[in-house]
Amino acid sequence: MAESENTELELTSKSAKQPDPALWVDQYGDSLYRFAYYRVNNSALAEDLVQDTFLAALKALDRFKGKASVKTWLTGILKNKIIDHYRKNSRVTNFSEISSFYEDEKDKAFKEDGHWRADASINPSEWRPEQVTNMDRKEFLEQFRLCADDLPEKIRQVFLLREVDGYSSPEICEMVGISKQNLWTILHRARMALRQCLEIHWFAPDKN
């Protein structure tokens, strides 16, 4: 009798760990959509990627081991779907078309030795301690997202892969089909553009 009860408890414990696909849309649909939309900047594409994620998860349901949460597991599948989209899209994208992004601003900001020009209007200003403290505020993160959305789409994708998703340089170069030098240039100009945008919309003296 005791052995039968233990077996029943063990089966119940195992079944409790099995994710219920019927709950996925209600429980994880919105967060997965936001995750996808932030990376592809297209609502219809984001919805398609989330649907593809749910379908892939259904097919792989028997491989779910419960080592991570269902949300983490689904997000991992979604990440792979987004990367597949980047790889496919990079085949028809010529990165030389955006090579001029921020080129004029760079020339105005730097001297030939690479140091900031003293009179350059684009030069970074000093950030006050209280402004840095407020960088964890929801309002700052929203402003950062808005500034990132203003980047050219391919530059934004590369920046997010590196600075948000944490992929390595070789991984990003392989995903989007660019050289290491191109990657460095894109990231450098993206950071400059983001800093200028944040200084205008967040760190300006009349802000905060």
Image (cartoon, rainbow, N blue to C red):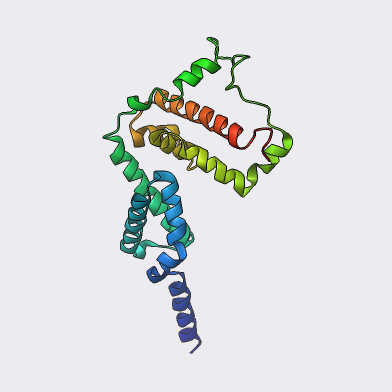
| Residue at the far left in the pictured view | 92
| Residue at the far right in the pictured view | 129
Residue 171 seen from this side:
no
Residue 23's place in the image compared with 154, above or below, is below
Label tally? 0
In the visual, does 82 lie left or right of 38?
left
In the visual, does 160 lie left or right of 114?
left
Residue 111 seen from this side:
yes
In the visual, does 156 lie left or right of 132?
left
Q: Nearer the viewer, residue 131 or 95?
A: 131
**Residue 123 percent across, percent down from the top left:** 60, 22
Residue at image location 40% in from the left, 49% down from the top: 79
Residue 113's place in the image compared with 82, above or below, is above
Q: Quadrant of residue 172?
A: top left
**Residue 160 percent across, percent down from the top left:** 46, 39
Q: Quadrant of residue 128?
A: top right
**Residue 99 percent across, percent down from the top left:** 38, 24
Q: Nearer the viewer, residue 64 or 20?
A: 20
| Residue at the far front in the pictured view | 206
Residue 58's place in the image compared with 43, above or below, is below
Residue at image location 48% in from the left, 74% down from the top: 13
Residue at image location 30% in from the left, 29% down from the top: 94
Residue at image location 57% in from the left, 22% down from the top: 122
Q: Nearer the viewer, residue 48 or 19?
A: 48
Q: Quadrant of residue 114?
A: top right
Work out which quarter of the rendered image holds the C terminus and state it: top right
**Residue 53 percent across, percent down from the top left:** 35, 56
| Residue at the far top in the pictured view | 112
Residue 55's place in the image compared with 183, above or below, is below
Q: Nearer the viewer, residue 23 or 200?
A: 200
